Amino acid sequence: MPGWPLVAIILLTGGLAPAFAEPDHPPRSDWNDNIIVSGGWEKGPGSDSQYGEAPVTGPEDPFKYEARVACTSGDSIIFPECASVMPPCATSDDASDKDGAESTAVYWYKALRNSSPPNWTYDSGPVCVQGKKPRDILAEIAAQISREFQHTPIAAASIGSQPGPHTLRGKDTNVYAIATTQNFNITLLEQQVTIIATPVAYTWDYGDGEAWGPTPVHGAPLHQDRIGEQTQTSHIYGITGKININLTTHFNGTYNVNGGPFLPIPGQGNIPSPPLGLTVWRAVTRLYADDCITNPNGIGC
């Protein structure tokens, strides 16, 4: 800012810190040069002094912004007077700041939104950022996401059988599952989180004491002309009577935070389907010698 000496400081986050000078472009009209309020910070990977999710100036701005804490302990070693030239960041008096967190002096860096990896360059600062105490939001979400996934209302797969609802003992009964990939949008720690549940395996309980799985095979319905053929998921019943086919579908989960990259969710969601009732009949074959044309009342006619 005006009147501050021009010096350079090495940041612990790497690279040269900006000189304490007025930026060569006018400040943004939607940023306050003295106090910038940041609702939720995200600590950068492997850093104690770098925070992401900075304010966005609007859809026409091609840049994304990142705050880096000014005058770190490393800065103080190189330039002991750095604290004396920092802006006066005081405890927040804002009633909406429930944590009463102290403001923090930061430099703003910028990079093109679509750059990968981002090429960060100095933009402005040092200025004060106040709001909630800096937290590793991504790590907190990662610690909670497995529990959230287990409580996500994933729709169970539906079960089909051919033939059905009646089949024959000793014949192949084709069973199959119909499951879908499902998306869920939730708010977690004031961040927008998208969860995707993808069916990846199936455990079959055929209702007669026989089971199969987990298997990636979900089966499929046959054409009417092919009913009775053996399939990967078909089953031959050796009993008669009413049985229930049960199925558990195993879902893998991925999630992202605020539109970032998708990350795997530890564990699986194991979703049981409503049972499918089936009646197994026995087929009896008999040989008859009567000619039903000459003797319409014969056995078997």
Image: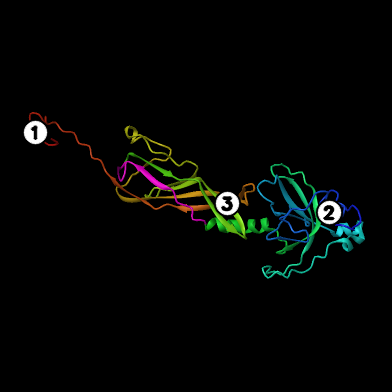
Q: Going from the N terminus, do you reach mark 3 or mark 1 first?
A: 3
Task: Out of 296 and 155, give the one closest to the viewer.
Answer: 155
Q: Which residue is drawn at 73% across and 56% down?
A: 31
List the residue tagged with mark 1. 296
List the residue tagged with mark 2. 12
- Circle 1: is it few (<14), some (14-19), or many (20+) Cα within 10 Å? few
Hey, what amino acid is under mark 3? Thr
Task: Out of 207 and 62, give the one closest to the viewer.
Answer: 62
Asked whether 156 falls inside the magenta stretch, the response is yes
> In which quadrant will I find the N terminus?
bottom right
Task: Out of 108 and 275, give the one closest to the viewer.
Answer: 108
> What's drawn in magenta, residue-wise?
152-169
Real-space CA distance between mark 1 and mark 2, rounded to the nearest whole angstrom = 101 Å
Contact between labelled residues 2 and 1, with CB atoms less than 8 Å apart: no
Q: Going from the N terminus, do you reach mark 3 or mark 2 first?
A: 2
Q: Is residue 149 left or right of residue 137?
A: left
Q: In which quarter of the image is residue 54?
A: bottom right
Say how the picture is coloured. rainbow
List the residue tagged with mark 3. 194
Question: x, y (%) of residue 160?
Answer: 37, 44
